[in-house]
Image (spheres, helix red, strand yellow):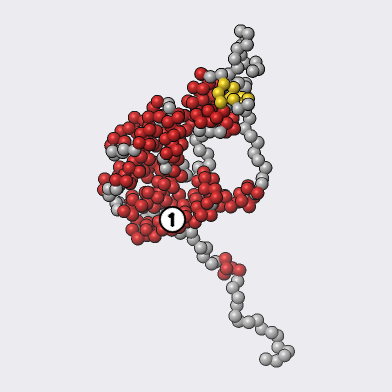
């Protein structure tokens, strides 16, 4: 080539921006399948189901490890609007004040809830939602493929436990019902497994659904003999909050999460009894009776007043006048 000739561009072309844009996006394996109820059939293959469960388990364990310091917040993110009723309505007629206490102001951003950590928390919540969705797909696939074996049991065990921790009752209820009433007759659970999952059904009926009679029927049907479960049923029937809190402390974490659904009713019952029968009580006694710290009860709407370690429920009558605003 002569020095005067124009320089030709190299024939070896680099990757163009358009080519880069055409590169396939890496697909999330948990989101690559649809719901079998919507026509997805690829998950009907047994081997594919087993691989899919392994992927779900890996993601779930990794997510728990990343959030091990605050798993309660992670699980609560799956159900951001739980059906929690305030004590304000129930206790308004027992309040010393005309209006329920105002809720505390939200704390300013700190190191614990900085924008970076809030973003990470949102990402974890999205990841948990993906895991729950994948579990639903797998459960539907197991049902669609009429699978009744040890693997199917594993799927339902895992789905039920995760649903309990996340208070995902919409997923928990059909999963537990299928395990006990459809899968168990075809692929019998061991005695310990049946006792565990039947106890979930019993406690769910009694504590979440408020159906103690149905819980008793389930207990007889599956032959569950568990003193802690029986103590909880008795406490709900008799309104014995001391027995309820003691029994709740004795059950395992999954059972405790279900029993927690009855806490509000037990707490309101205890506070109403106190309100009708006492002028003042020890703060510690109220906290033991309700299973809640006094500051939490105030935030929930209890309008009584604390004075020197005592909770003033009602003011005594002074000289024959009404006892509302008097001191002492």
- Image point 53% across, 28% down: which residue? 286
Q: Nearer the viewer, residue 240 or 2?
A: 240
Quadrant of the rendered structure where residue 327 is?
top right
Q: Could you tell me if residue 300 is visible in this image?
A: no
Q: Nearer the viewer, residue 308 or 253?
A: 308
- Image point 44% across, 47% down: which residue? 162
Residue 248: percent from left, percent from top:
43, 36
Is residue 300 left or right of 177 when viewed as pictured? Answer: right
Residue 165: percent from left, percent from top:
46, 44
- How many residues crowd around disc 1 within 10 Å: few (fewer than 14), some, or many (20 or more)? some
Q: Nearer the viewer, residue 227 or 205?
A: 227
Is residue 29 left or right of 297 when viewed as pictured? Answer: left
Is residue 99 left or right of 138 when viewed as pictured? Answer: right
- Image point 29% across, 35% down: which residue? 220
Residue 249, compared with residue 45, is above or below; it is above
Residue 191: percent from left, percent from top:
29, 45
Spot the residue most to the right. Answer: 4
**SS assignment at label 1:** helix
Residue 24, compared with residue 175, is above or below; it is below
Quadrant of the rendered structure where residue 94 is?
top right
Disc 1 designates what residue? Answer: 57
Quadrant where the N terminus sits is bottom right
Quadrant where the C terminus sits is top right
Residue 215: percent from left, percent from top:
34, 33
Quadrant of the rendered structure where residue 87 is?
top right
Count of number-bearing discs: 1
């Amino acid at each position: 080539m002569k020095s005067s000739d124009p320089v030709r561009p190299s024939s070896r072309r680099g990757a163009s921006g358009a080519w880069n844009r055409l590169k396939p996006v890496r697909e999330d394996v948990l989101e690559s399948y649809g719901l079998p109820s919507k026509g997805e059939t690829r998950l009907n293959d047994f081997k594919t189901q087993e691989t899919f469960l392994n992927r779900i388990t890996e993601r779930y364990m990794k997510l728990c490890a990343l959030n091990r310091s605050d798993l309660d917040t992670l699980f609560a993110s799956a159900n951001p609007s739980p059906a929690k009723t305030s004590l304000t309505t129930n206790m308004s007629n027992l309040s010393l004040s005309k209006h329920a206490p105002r809720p505390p102001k939200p704390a300013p951003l700190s190191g614990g809830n900085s924008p970076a950590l809030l973003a990470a928390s949102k990402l974890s919540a999205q990841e948990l939602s993906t895991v729950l969705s994948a579990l639903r797909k797998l459960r539907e696939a197991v049902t669609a493929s009429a699978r009744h074996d040890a693997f199917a049991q594993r799927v339902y065990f895992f789905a039920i436990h995760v649903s309990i921790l996340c208070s995902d009752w919409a997923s928990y209820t059909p999963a537990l019902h299928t395990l006990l009433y459809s899968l168990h007759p075809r692929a019998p659970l061991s005695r310990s497994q049946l006792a565990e999952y039947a106890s979930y059904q019993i406690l769910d009926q009694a504590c979440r659904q408020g159906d103690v009679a149905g819980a008793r029927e389930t207990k007889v049907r599956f032959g569950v003999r568990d003193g802690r479960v029986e103590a909880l049923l008795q406490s709900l029937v008799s309104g014995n909050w001391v027995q309820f809190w003691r029994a709740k402390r004795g059950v395992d974490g999954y059972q405790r999460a279900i029993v927690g659904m009855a806490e509000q009713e037990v707490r309101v019952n205890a506070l109403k009894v106190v309100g009708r029968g006492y002028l003042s009580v020890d703060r510690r006694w109220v906290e033991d009776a309700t299973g809640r710290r006094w500051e939490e009860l105030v935030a929930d709407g209890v309008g009584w007043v604390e004075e020197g370690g005592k909770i003033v429920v009602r003011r005594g009558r002074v000289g024959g006048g009404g006892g509302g605003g008097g001191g002492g």
